[in-house]
Image (cartoon, coloured by chain):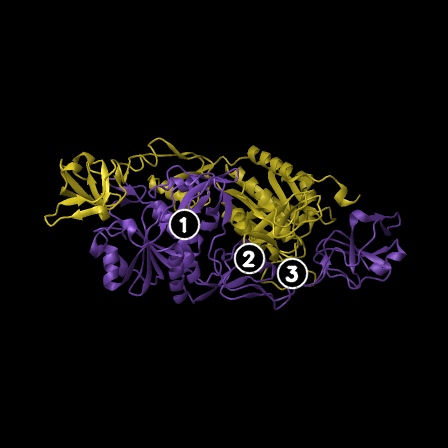
Chain colours: A yellow, B purple
Amino acid sequence: MAGESTVLMPMEQALEALLRQAEAAPIEDVESVSIDDAVGRILAEPLVAPLDLPPWPNSAMDGYAIREADLHAQPLRVSQKIFAGTQPEPLEPGSCARIFTGAPMPEGADSVEMQENAEVLDDGRVRFVESVRKGQHVRPQAGEARAGEQVLAAGVRLGPIELGLAASLGMPRLKVSRKLRVALLSTGDELVEPGETLQPGQIYNSNRVLLRHWLQRLGCDVTDVGIVPDDLSQVRQCLTDLHQVDLILSTGGVSVGEADYLGQVLREEGELRLWKLAIKPGKPLTCGNYRGVAVIGLPGNPASTLVTFGLLARPYLLRRMGASEIEPLSFLVPAGFSWAKPGKRREYLRARLEAGRAVLYANQSSSILRSAAWADGVVEVREHSQLEEGESVRFISFAELLG
Amino acid sequence: MAGESTVLMPMEQALEALLRQAEAAPIEDVESVSIDDAVGRILAEPLVAPLDLPPWPNSAMDGYAIREADLHAQPLRVSQKIFAGTQPEPLEPGSCARIFTGAPMPEGADSVEMQENAEVLDDGRVRFVESVRKGQHVRPQAGEARAGEQVLAAGVRLGPIELGLAASLGMPRLKVSRKLRVALLSTGDELVEPGETLQPGQIYNSNRVLLRHWLQRLGCDVTDVGIVPDDLSQVRQCLTDLHQVDLILSTGGVSVGEADYLGQVLREEGELRLWKLAIKPGKPLTCGNYRGVAVIGLPGNPASTLVTFGLLARPYLLRRMGASEIEPLSFLVPAGFSWAKPGKRREYLRARLEAGRAVLYANQSSSILRSAAWADGVVEVREHSQLEEGESVRFISFAELLG
């Protein structure tokens, strides 16, 4: 009967099962969204360059456009001045053109010499003080992308850089997956929202705020259900009232405790699987459906909520929206601590980088969120393993995980 | 006269000068903002715990609350059942209490045994199958924070985690610095907004979209001025029209080129300093003021805009809003490339992590943004240095830089 002796589900297995479920229920609706509103959205169709980028060869420098073969005839007369945004005349043979960064190369010119290497004579003619390599300081047409070429694949998450790139291709709107509609609910009679008065036995609900912001960053549309009381008919009513939801995300109330009404409703009107994960914090995870709508139930302790959402629910919902990259970047850093006792569960310890080493917050209790506010991210200590100070550990920064 | 032979300003010197300017003009207005709207804002006053967290000792497990000294008298009668959110009676001597995770400990109890280690007899009494350590599975009152203790310092940037922590302390609103008001403008007659038709010599403006999203993520209030034509009176009019702005951020048009009208207006109605930075991409940076309003002019090539904004403007504006941590996390990773020729400028190369190694995008031209969309971040190759494949390089991920 001892809890730790039951078989625990390895992290990889849980993630794989969740991703399979996500792939079985992809968001297939596609929306056209302005690039001004598309941050965090996932590209639904490849972005194909509608034009050559740049559209014509142009100067990489402020200087002079020349035909390299004319250089023997220096000094050269300046036959035109080409600003960015203008259309040049063909370069007159035996002359050069004053040109500015980004301005189109005139027909016939093949190289640019920067103004710092040019000497302007009294009569206005120009002599160049260094030798010129043919083609230098010219950005070729289509050097960045050729018309018809795929520039971003479907499944890319759109951040400021990708949207800037779409802008450079002249795309005012992009096709993205519809936002995942997530109903967010917290269960537990002990919970009270900030601003209310705590009665004996009550605590403030931190998970609603944590997850609402996080879901929004990930490009989800949040229906904030709030706190659902520990009462069977109210839990049932609350689920019945949900409409047009792709995922029900709950925290708390998925233990084997006697007051698990959410579990009871799922058993009756859908499906309930209780996983015991080999991770710490965050052992219990619920996975199932309510009348066909996917349900993920995270443990209610804040550090457990954080870790299970970040490492399991986050990739699940990104994948449902069609994202190709779902894992946060991680880095190997030297451990600023030792780990003597191998555990049965993989630990995700809240840690800060100090002088390049991962240092742990003293209190790693799953009930404590302050550890995460102090930390830069989590380090992963794998099950059944020990660690000496200075050995490499995998570090996942919150910037990667929260974005 | 050769450009590269003029003295270049080292990165550290430029950053230090910008931070000094930021600290001389801090945003001093403070706003009270709901924790539901405070993501990305900077805490203006320390967050002090208004209560003990947790407010009372509680159970870390589903199980039985006991007085350890009573265990000699096992099996114990169950004298009450304590759910989370309820107020327990004092524990009757010689009995135990059924208790659930998060429920308050009854007065007189000092330990919890988990239900997996309890055997319930036919008469309802309970015997424990393992020995109990006094105090086990009890979360002490104020274990996370004590009333009056500072939990977050002024200057902390508020993300989902910090806002969750504020919620757990019952704070519905927080005092944050007013958003920095940034007027964003692009100069250059060659620029056209996406959706319009390109005329000969024109290109689409990518920087407006890149920077608008980025500024918003950093908690700035953006006045999107758009493209300012290369015309002295229009540049002047556009600046005159700005009201209640803390920073004018421009891209392009700060070269030594002849069409630099923004520079001319600043010289006449404020101050203009042209820096030549020892970084690549991104050599030219303008820093000055227009009638007392700070101006930062970034180079217009997209990769230069990205690097100079991320490494110089970003810390500047975070510091003006009072942020304490302004530098992105960075990590040492093995270089998946070699660097034979020491440069005069520090290179920030767009790179991707492949099997833990930083691999470079083939085309590192400053005019190309596609490199950044392909990359996970930038690696720093310091001036005057060489690098062999496998050596460590500093890597800054875009998740750190963009958030």
Do pointers 3 and 1 mark residues of a single chain?
A: yes
Q: Quick one: label 1, few (<14), some, or many (20+) residues within 10 Å?
A: many
Residue depicted at x 61% and y 38%: A15
A67 to B402, vertically: above or below: above
Residue depicted at x 38% and y 45%: B342
Q: Which x, y percent locates residue A115?
A: 22, 47
Q: Outermost residue toward the bottom?
A: B148
Q: Return the mark for residue B290.
A: none
Q: Which residue is mark 1?
A: B213
Three-letter code, disc 1:
His
The answer to whether residue B262 is seen in the rendering is yes
Three-letter code, disc 3:
Glu
Residue depicted at x 60% and y 65%: B49
Disc on the earlier residue, 3 or 2 = 3
Q: Nearer the viewer, residue B306 or A108?
A: A108
Q: Which residue is mark 3?
A: B144
* Mark 3 and mark 1: Cα distance apart in space: 36 Å
Q: Nearer the viewer, residue A379 or B223?
A: A379
Q: Return the mark for residue B162.
A: 2
